[in-house]
Image (tube, rainbow, N blue to C red):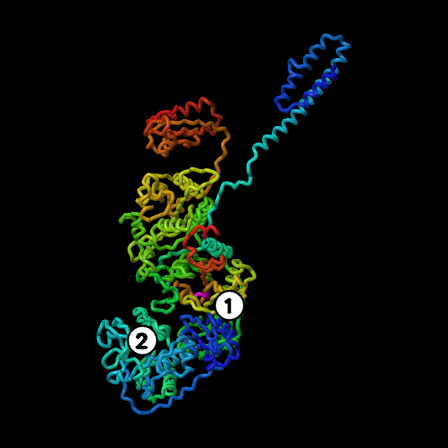
Amino acid sequence: MRVSFDWLKDFVKVAATPEAVAEKLTMLGLEIEALERIDGDVVLEVNVTPNRPDCLSIMGIARELSAAYGIPLAFPDLNVVSESKELDFNVEILEADLCRRYAGRIVHNLKVGPSPDWMKKRLEKCGIRSINNVVDITNYVLLEFGHPLHAFDLSTIRGHLIRVGTPKVTTGQSNMKFTTLDGSEREVSGETLLIWDAERPIAIAGVMGGSDTEVTEKTVDIFIESAYFEPTSIRRTSKTLGLKTEASYRFERGTDLKALKKALDRAAMLMHEVAGGTLYGKIDIYPKRFYPKQINVRYERIGRLLGVKLSEQEVLDCLQGLGLEIFECNSEGFKVKVPPYRGDIAMEADIIEEVARLYGYDRIPAELPKARLGVDSRKEIVSAREIRHDIRESLLKCGFDEAINLSFMGAYELDLLSIPAEDARRKLVQVRNPLREEDAYMRTTLVPALIRNLIHNLAHGNRELRLFEMAKAFIDIDHNSLPEEKERIAALYYREKTKTLYKDDTPDFFVVKGIGDAMFEGIGISGHSYVRSDEPFLHPGRSANIMIGGSKAGFIGELSPAVIEALDIKAQKPSVIVMEMDLGAIISLSKRDAIYKQLPKYPFVERDTAIIVDARLQAAEIIGHLKDHASGIVEDVSIFDIYQGGNIGVGKKSIAFNVRYRSPEKTLTDQEVEDTHKVLVDYILEKTGGQVRI
Amino acid sequence: MSENLKRTFLDEVSSLKSLADAANLRVKYLGKKGIITAKIKSLSSLSPEERRVAGREINELKQFIEEECERKESLLKSAELKGRLLAEAIDITLPGKAVSFGHEHPLSRTLREVVDIFTRMGFDVQEGPEVELDCYNFEALNIPKDHPARDMQDTFYISEDIVLRTHTSPVQVRVMEKKKPPLRFIAPGKVYRCDADVTHSPMFHQVEGLMVDKDITFSHLKGVLIAFIHQMFGPDIPVRFRPSYFPFTEPSAEIDMGCILCKSAGCRVCKGTGWLEILGAGMVNPKVLENVGYDSEEYTGFAFGMGIERITLLKYSIDDIRLLFENDIRFLRQF
């Protein structure tokens, strides 16, 4: 809210500079966001929190300053001289729950025209455009008192009657059309509170008037409305219609049930002064009266909540000037009657906040609490956090940069990856009001985001990319309950052949697989294996599912050429490696309790053998056979060379493996090793149908 | 005679060029058929008197030759090693084989720093779901439906009753429902609001904190948060608390720290005020405590929340929040 410093001074004669006042207001909870000098005046931009609708007015802010500086509040003179003539005009409130009070005044024979300069200027400084004197006066009073008013052209109101009610109650309609004064025809529901004359609706209560009853240059008689509408009803209407006005903004936050009469009188006086109108008696229908809330306040409680012991006098001094009625004071505490403009005060803690606010938060001493020790977290939560940390560290050490992407994705991204309809990744959680269509769903996989990151980086000339992300994926269960949130980890590796000094020709797939294995080792997962993957977006010959304990924990592989083409990835090199795993599963399988194994006492002996087998035979199979048949003295087996071509026949390949033998009990003799190795090689040859390469 | 031999030997030694030549020379004099060996053999033809004199002479000569050979060999050996090392020299100014560590995302880094500070103060770490029930995100925190306070947080809706959490505060409620005081924890995590521009991202990170026990006061709130800001940004940073409004705390406060960019002199980032808003906080609203079944007469507590993006942008002078989520490696590798 924009507040003119000059205008403020009409109500509170502060001597302080605008800067000092701004600082004071900020420290009272009315943050001044900007200070602007206009025409020798200063406009303060006040950020009013939603609990303080009373401060959406010059008067409200003046009241705060009055309390803070201890300067009395000057109230404008409200002596309305009106004709006592009996009026043939009635107001009926049909739903008192939605409209607790409705007051109005009739003004005759006024002259609609431009407002005087002083009024125009004040309105403009506060950000409101001048329209004509009648509309301007309602706005002027709105800014001054914080109470919205509406002026109708009296001649357009039919049947000398105003009714307040929803279509449902007034006419039984469940919805209807209504044209507001901005010229738009709007669909209003049966629950919308409207203002009617004898025949038809003439305004959307608390939000906007109708075009038919608008004040124009031809208007001579008006009806000024000043009412109290129920905040939640106004808020619902404003939300449903997508129509937010100065009036609705204040009504939905709560207006002053009592001051609405003063606002009406102030407006009436100005109508007389500025537009020369003749005033008539007030109509005031007030079916649900205001009863002030009473709150008990205990001095002891103030000390216990704030941590500072204030004297009784200090407490009462703080509250002075806020308009609270304090009574039944004793040494334990006192009672407070809350005025109608402070709807935010409803309990003792609210009063304590007022005390703290006026006393000054900065004067309350800072102190570290004495706390009881406690170990709240279960061990598994702590260790999950450690495992996550270790995984992150191992990927960082391996040169992967950490990515953080938004949790959203578009359904089309799953189409591009050819994810089938029955796949769990199609169980989408849809956002009802996304900012962009591409962000309409919560992601079920992290891969699309990493691919987006690849495309972005390629477009900016970054030709080498190692990214990983740890985040949640969201799998819908049944629309009505919370989705399953699954922690995932994903990585993407892309590297173009660049001219480098030192060569390394390891195929990308194996680079990433090696890093994955290192990560597993770091968190104590062993015995995982790789089987061919059927992920539809991966190259079928260059991808694997990562199996841990017999179930799929994730996948690793090269993006299929079809995906590269569909996504229009401008990669110089076709191999983009992606990996994604179920982080929760990995964490639960991690075993990090190490047990020391004695270091070997006796030397080892190694034997290398190359065999020629069918080219389709996979390494894991040979290693599997080797391990199956291993006797007690086989310590380790590894493959160290694969060769095809040359004198190796077509459809065949040579695999060379190394076996390391060692006994825990003695030094092995050559003969023992020779015999064992021969048995092992014969077994492999039998299993694979291969032959020893000579 | 032996003087001649000695001179000849010394000439030969001094002209030696390699270890191989030295070995040959040693053989020539001291080998089985060497000159000295021959001389020793010839001693047997002499009379005992002559043999004694000649024998001593020849033995002295032999010892001399042996010593000289050894000395020369050792010289040649070190010369040869020197030569080899020289030949093996590499261009040590060539670059090393690149080993690049990955870079932690700046948000993770800030988050880790914040979590570390609070865990050092004995705060536990808790988590909660990102897709959250309306009742946890709003109602239990004293934000009813149709309340203007909902405007403070533009919400993404999944259904009428399910939202993307707009803050980490629902974790407060979830934890309090399960545990009795004393409680002292923080809850870091992702949160969502329907807003996107240079300083707002629809997804961002918050850290929520809660401490509930008997006799927890506003003074303690101040003590803990000042300690945090001083640990995070430096011990001399001024801090101020000003009244604000959050439906789930009463009294509520916003906490500003002196602008770290201009040292409180006033700049574009702090809009000339010298202050930067850094945290929201307050004493837990008694209604929130009652909602989870705590006796608000017996227990009091404070809660606070901060945005990790905001701290990160300030800390690293980043001027556009979107950079944090583009994952451009030229950006990521700066941290």
| Residue underneath mark 2 | A208
| Residue underneath mark 1 | B273
For disc 2, the chain is A
Asked if one can make out residue A340 in the rendered structure from this viewpoint, the answer is no
The image position of residue A396, as x and y in percent, is 46, 47
For disc 1, the chain is B
Image quarter hosting the N terminus of chain A: bottom left
Horizontal side of residue B107 vs A420, given as left or right: right
Give the magenta-colored segment's residue range.
B281-285
Residue shown at the point (35%, 41%) measured from the top left:
A547
| SS category of the residue bearing label 2 | strand
Asked if one can make out residue A148 in the rendered structure from this viewpoint, the answer is yes
Give the amino acid at mark 1: Thr
Image quarter hosting the C terminus of chain A: top left
Q: Residues within 10 Å of mark 1 (few under 14, many from 20)?
A: some
**Residue A315: which disc?**
none
The image position of residue B31, as x and y in percent, is 64, 16
- Using the image, determine if residue A680 lies above or below residue B176: above
